[in-house]
Amino acid sequence: MKFFLDTYALVELIKGNENYKKYVNNELFTSILNLYELFYYLLRSYDEDKAKLFYYQYVDILIPIRDEHVFEASKMKLKIKDLSYTDALGYSIAQKEGIRFLTGDNEFKNLDNVEFVK
């Protein structure tokens, strides 16, 4: 199965959350914006070298951001104002690419095509 990892999911994988381990052997994807958020989060907890080490573990699974992703994310953000731009874009990428959106963010709990895991 294919999953789009939002930043929440990336952090939980790095932290070793048992509930996320079962997803490791699937096809995983994310966006450069999620890696940007992840790197920022990691810099708060680790030194720069360790943060880069984690960052580079996920560079190979990036999905290029296309115009239609941006268009859909913008429409979604208009409807759900509390979503971050990164979350709206990630969810829109997952929708457009037919990939299940893996997250633990409460904003996505009742949306279609979401694998909600705490």
Image (cartoon, rainbow, N blue to C red):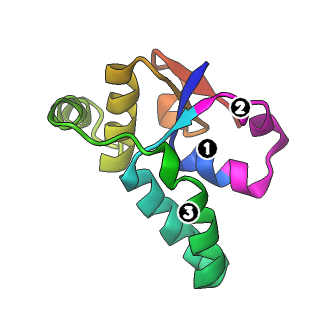
Q: Are marks 2 and 1 in contact (CB under 8 Å)?
A: yes
Residue type for callout 1: Ala
User: Which residue is at the front of the view, 50 or 73?
Assistant: 50
**Magenta stretch contains residue 18:** yes
Q: Mark 1 or mark 3: which is in front? A: 3
- Circle 3 residue: 56
Magenta stretch, residue numbers: 12-27
Q: Which mark is residue 9?
A: 1
Does residue 116 lie above or below 81 as drawn?
above
For the point 25% across and 30% down, which residue is it? 76
Badge 1 or badge 3: first in the primary sequence: 1
Q: Which mark is residue 23?
A: 2
For the residues marked 1 and 3, what is the alpha-carbon distance in whole angstroms? Answer: 16 Å
Badge 2 or badge 1: first in the primary sequence: 1
For the point 19% across and 38% down, which residue is it? 70
For the residues marked 2 and 3, what is the alpha-carbon distance in whole angstroms? Answer: 19 Å
Look at the numbered disc 1 and give the secondary structure of its residue.
Answer: helix
